[in-house]
Amino acid sequence: MKVLFPVQNDDERKFMIADDINAKNFVCVYDTQTHQIQWTSNSELSSSASKNLSCAIKEMGVEGIVTLEEDSEIDLKGTDLDVYQSKTKDLISAIKLLNQNKLPLMA
């Protein structure tokens, strides 16, 4: 399963989960089966979307999103994306929790 994490855009904070998804951030797509990470700028992702950001995410094969906030700026209603909530901003810690099935699904 591929899971998207919004992350900070500079090298010093590349492994810090961003508070939200916006054009100045990057996204990290983590594959739970292969354990590979793909980095993409959010502006690049949204510019490739014909309809909206959630469509672009789905086109990448992403099945879930990890967020810090209960209210995501992305409209995920009507999609079948799983939304997980992380209590930590540390990307590596959040990935470990995801692999251990310890990130709660948001309703």
Image (cartoon, rainbow, N blue to C red):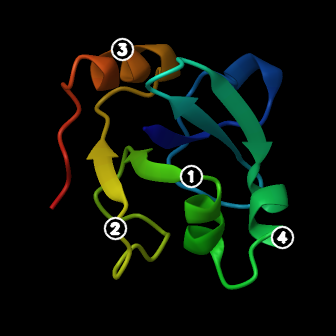
- Residue behind mark 4: 47
Question: How far apart are labels 2 and 4 at the CA level?
Answer: 22 Å
For the view shown, which residue lies furthest in the front direction?
33
Question: As rendered, which of 75 and 58 lies closer to the eye?
Answer: 58
| Mark 3 secondary-structure assignment | helix
Which of the two discs, 2 and 4, labels the residue nearer the N terminus? 4
- Residue behind mark 2: 80
Question: How far apart are labels 4 and 3 at the CA level?
Answer: 30 Å
Q: Quadrant of the N terminus?
A: top left
The reply to whether the C-beta atoms of the residues labelled 3 and 2 are less than 8 Å apart is no
Q: Does 92 appear above or below 87?
A: above
Residue 48 shown left or right of residue 13 in the figure? right
Q: Nearer the viewer, mark 4 or mark 1?
A: 1
Q: Does 30 appear above or below 75?
A: above
Q: Nearer the viewer, mark 3 or mark 2?
A: 2
Residue at image location 42% in from the left, 21% down from the top: 95
- Residue behind mark 3: 96
Q: Position of residue 33 (x, y in %)?
A: 45, 23
Q: Does 2 appear above or below 82?
A: above
Question: How far apart are labels 2 and 1 at the CA level?
Answer: 12 Å
Dividing the picture into quadrants, the one containing residue 81 is: bottom left
- Residue behind mark 1: 61
Q: Position of residue 91 (x, y in %)?
A: 50, 23
